[in-house]
Amino acid sequence: MDPRKLLERAGLEAKGAPEPLYGGDISRVYRLGAYVVKLSPNPPLGLFPAEARGLRALAERGVRVPRVFFASEEGLILEYLPEGPPDWEGLARMLAGLHRQREASYWAEAGFLGTFPLPGGEGREWTEFFFSRCIEPLLRATWDRLEGLGPKVEALYQKPLPAEGPAPLHGDLWHGNVRFTLEGPALLDPSFFVGERGVDLAMMRLFGGFPQEFWRAYRALYPVPEEVERALPRYQVYYLLAHVYFFGEGYLDSLWKAISAS
């Protein structure tokens, strides 16, 4: 679809030619004036509406995100956020504020990690909720590609994960989903759910990670207990299983290292 067609469908207008932006491995992303249009050739049913719900959920909890103008099965129209200077301390304040919030239970609407569908649900026991909602679906989808690591993954969740309390999470918080804007740090492309903050912290240690400037500020604002630090490899298994699913067996070595560190 031409991004201008989606703007027309939403009753919005932007002049000029679409400017391609980086959209990762899933979406085609364009800037048209004040708008960002996200499209995908064959998106799974519910992908863009789920992203819109996640952005709104983060905004309701005090996180800067692009405003959602329109969401449909065909695509998403967001506010364009002009780029600003890096502000790692500001990002630490925003994330510590998010992670300190508490909700009544662990919960998620049906959603996605990338384009991988994840079920909705609710629970009060964290380890069981995390395994059934996040690990088990990916484990079933990748079992035949894990070269015998499947039972080792299952065994990781036989012992309880530490629980500080149900907190709202971005859910896919690698550095590519952070944008520094003129008004401060903002988050993009969430896989929102309510869980333990270790899930976000674990992803923030993968794939290049965040600089020490961020971690010093975050830990000063919201210290990370030793038991949460020790659990981070078990949370990283979630994201590494997803990478095996999307990109293949080249991630098995990283998966094995996370299992061994758990």
Image (cartoon, rainbow, N blue to C red):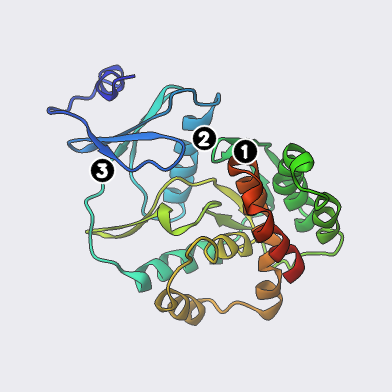
Image point (59%, 37%), residue name: 111
User: Mark 3 — residue?
Assistant: 80
User: Mark 1 — residue?
Assistant: 109
Q: Earlier in the sequence, mark 2 or mark 1?
A: 2
Q: Amino acid at mark 1?
A: Glu
Q: Quadrant of the C terminus?
A: bottom right
Label 2 residue SS: helix
Q: Quadrant of the N terminus?
A: top left
Q: Earlier in the sequence, mark 3 or mark 2?
A: 2
Q: Nearer the viewer, mark 1 or mark 3?
A: 3
CB atoms of marks 2 and 1 within 8 Å:
yes
Q: Residues within 10 Å of mark 2 (few under 14, many from 20)?
A: many
Q: Amino acid at mark 3?
A: Tyr
Q: Quadrant of residue 11?
A: top left
Residue 82, compared with residue 37, is above or below; it is below
Q: Position of residue 14 (x, y in %)?
A: 17, 28
